Amino acid sequence: MLVSAKDMLNKARDGKYAVGQFNINNLEWTKSVLLTAEELKSPVILGVSEGAGKYMCGYKTVVGMVKGMLEELNITVPVALHLDHGSYEGAKKCIEAGFSSVMFDGSHYPIAENIEKTTELVKICNEKGLSIEAEVGSIGGEEDGVVGMGECADPNECKQIADLGVTMLAAGIGNIHGKYPANWAGLSFDTLAAVKEKTGDMPLVLHGGTGIPEDMIKKAISLGVAKINVNTECQLSFAEATRKYIEAGKDLEGKGFDPRKLLAPGAEAIKATVKEKMELFGSVGKA
Ligand code: 13P
């Protein structure tokens, strides 16, 4: 059964660890993340961007696939199916399709409009027992063609949005999606501490989990981060394993590649990446 992310994040905040959100793109990706979470007895959040949702034939297909896997693979750990960086319309569609959690990314709207739209979605999610993530201060890098500059969130605006009753809050603290440039200034822990002070018990979310040094991840968790999103690192390990398999030319022999064998090394590589992150985030054994 899919669950809201609320309980797992409140527990993570209290226990000073973070739950990983791993973005999924296809069946292999999803299966790898779920099997690893089950093996490590870790709660997990499956992130679906609007682009990935479209690729997988729409949100209803995603819900069907994930629910089917939970049953067929006997998954017992808490799993939330979460829209990542959703638009207002996308969030509504996911709620209807059966997601257990949504992110409404209103960070590009003026704060008043972000508040208005977040308020409406909080109400709908509360009525249905779903969790909702909001964002203040855009996360840098590129996500589905949208490029953010990695600005730091205004702690007062964070408080305004947190007070609307969201389940978790993503605050920009200099983090960006994708690989970090060599001249990256690092996470702004001053901003994180100020946001934490203003928002109290609110579980905080760190986007752009790929490539952040381990000591910064640990410090962020100690300052209230309870959810960390990882996407690019799974893509990189998947691509590298697939490239090696193709270069080895094993299945060619005039018959082409067996699609199941072709995708297997990438799926194993994702498992290894997810395991490494769950160990780093401290969520192993917390299911
Ligand atoms: P990375 O691609 O940098 O891991 O970030 C993922 C993310 O934050 C998804 O919302």
Image: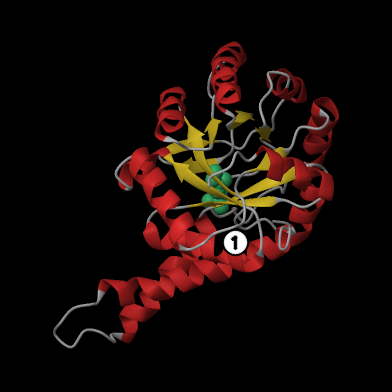
User: Which amino acid is tagged 1?
Assistant: Ala
For image coordinates 72% across by 57% down, the residue present is 281
Give above or below for 109 relative to 95.
above
Q: Quadrant of residue 60?
A: top left
Report the front residue among 5 and 254: 5
Q: Quadrant of the C terminus?
A: bottom right
Asked if one can make out residue 76 in the rendered structure from this viewpoint, the answer is yes
Give above or below for 29 relative to 141.
below
Left or right: 168, with 103 as reference point: right
Asked if one can make out residue 174 in the rendered structure from this viewpoint, the answer is no
Left or right: 142, with 274 as reference point: left
Q: Residue 138 at x, y = what percent?
A: 59, 32
The colour scheme of the drawn protein is: secondary structure
Q: Residue 83 at x, y = what percent?
A: 49, 38
Question: At numbered mark 1, what does the secondary structure look like: helix, strand or loop?
Answer: helix
Q: Quadrant of residue 13?
A: top right
For image coordinates 57% across by 36% down, the residue present is 149
Q: Is mark 1 within 8 Å of ligand 1?
A: no
Q: Tally the numbered discs.
A: 1
Report the front residue among 259 and 230: 259
Q: Residue 189 at x, y = what percent?
A: 80, 42
Q: Residue 162 at x, y = what percent?
A: 71, 24
Give above or below for 90 relative to 18.
above
Left or right: 19, with 97 as reference point: right
Q: For mark 1, what is the residue?
A: 37
Q: Quadrant of residue 51?
A: top left
10 Å crowding of disc 1: few (<14), some (14-19), many (20+): many
Report the front residue among 186 and 238: 238
